[in-house]
Image: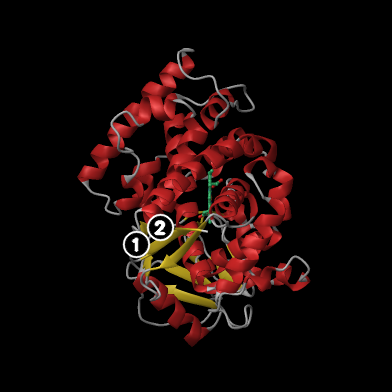
Amino acid sequence: MTSVQRKLRKPPGPDAPVVLGIDADTLATLQQIQLDYGDMVSITKPNGRLAYFVNDATEVRRILTRRHSKYNKGPGFERVKMLLGNGLIVSDGDVWRRSRRMIQPAFSRQNVHRLMAVMVECCDRRALHWAELAANGEHCNITAETSDFALELILISIFSSDYHARIMTEGDNPFAFLSRDSTRDLSVVMKVRHLRILLLSIIEDRRSGRGSEEFDFLTMYLQATDKNGQQFSDAELLDELMTLIVAGFETSANTLNWVWYLIAKHPDVEAKLIAEAAEYLPCVSALSADSLANMTYTQQVLEEALRLYPPVWLFTRRSHEEDHLDEYDVPLDTDIYLSPFILHRTPHYWPDPDSFDPERFKVTDQSKNDRPYFPFSLGPRRCLGEYFSFLEMKVHIGLLLPRFRLQLIDESQPQLELGINLRASRDIYMKPTER
Ligand code: HEM
């Protein structure tokens, strides 16, 4: 019997078509479907396409690691494509493989360590601002602050002194709208076009030797070569730079936003973080890769925040080869939905899943390695900036928390805003005081 004749083995699922996007309704639908049908569910979309919702830890791991080459990026990336062209996050197959090989060396630990001074510089600017707010008794919009911090950091890490000389020439950061404007309409197209022209002129200057010669991602991207000795073209470089900016800033900014909220809600956690910073980071000159590595409790807090609020809360894939998962067939062109948000809060993996408890990630707790946890994805497409972002977040919390106490103005739990990224639905305001 050929595979065409054999009856398709599908997991259980609803008979009626189900609409799936990347939004709050989709989260509610997937959560209900999980309750009704379990961890492997088949769904028919309104256009007749077959989709699987996979919440089984083993199968999720399999899709992202050993079987990753059978899947391309899935639905929902159309809007992202408008911004990122064919950069790493959206590309597939040979194009992705070539770019990943060219770019990956830029993210070595050694290179990221060289950017720690920029992380400190960006914290200093926040500290200056917060000290002013504290002196005047004013509130601080921590959502905007973490966003400004992470955006400035990634831009200086890419462009070094060109950031001030070429990008911030008009006062406002021309990239700021990327997080503030979730629409993808014509005005955004125009702003993106403007940014690409600006980036292109910086690239041209660098190629001709007129630009900065400092150590930064742009230099490393410009020098990267593929196995034939070819460098990125200008168009490829533009897509990769936009990808780096978009991938590298909202994710860390959103995480830090939640971290400040969670710290303010848990004074016991705050006290332990401050004690750890006092031990390993008593002053800026004590900062090193080793001192940050020793800050294991801070690491636990960040990991627990990412469990509860994974910025990339839903991954989609589409099969471009037949596959099978558990005892089920995956035909060609099946859409796959995986959700770190749902898996991270599934009670049989994570007891009392909605509570914030950094002890779950204690280094000595061996069972932590068996629980499904993938805020940075897994396998060959795993986030390239994982180490960079942990360092940036540790420096941020390690330097700013011992200096400032931030109290919530509104104690109520912010709702979730679910788009490509998971955010708080409202800005979080806090009152800073110097300790
Ligand atoms: C808390 C912070 C971050 C989180 C949670 C995060 C999460 C992720 C996830 C889940 C993916 C894979 C998406 C998918 O396969 O559908 C990804 C990809 C990526 N991330 Fe991150 N990210 C973070 C920070 C960063 C930073 C700071 C950078 C750069 C400095 C970065 C650069 C990238 C790149 C280049 C990719 C594409 C990798 C590829 O497809 O080969 N990320 N990230």
Label 2 close to label 1 by CB (< 8 Å): yes
Image coordinates of residue 354 in percent, x first then y, are 53, 79
Name which quarter of the figure residue 279 lies in.
Answer: bottom right
Amino acid type, label 2: Ile
Residue lying furthest left in this view? Answer: 186
Q: In the image, is residue 209 above or below residue 217?
A: above
Name which quarter of the figure residue 271 lies in.
Answer: bottom right
Q: Nearer the viewer, residue 58 or 192?
A: 192
Amino acid type, label 1: Asp
**Is the residue at mark 1 in contact range of ligand 1, meaning its CB lies under 8 Å from it?**
no
Pointer 2: what residue? Answer: 142
Q: Which mark is residue 107?
A: none
Q: Nearer the viewer, residue 154 or 398?
A: 398
Q: How many C-alpha atoms fall within 10 Å of the one at disc 1: few (<14), some, or many (≥20)?
A: few
Q: Quadrant of the N terminus?
A: bottom right
Q: Is residue 76 visible?
A: no
Q: Nearer the viewer, residue 68 or 340?
A: 340
Left or right for 148, reference 354: left
Q: Earlier in the sequence, mark 2 or mark 1?
A: 2
Pointer 1: what residue? Answer: 427
Image coordinates of residue 289 in percent, x first then y, are 70, 44
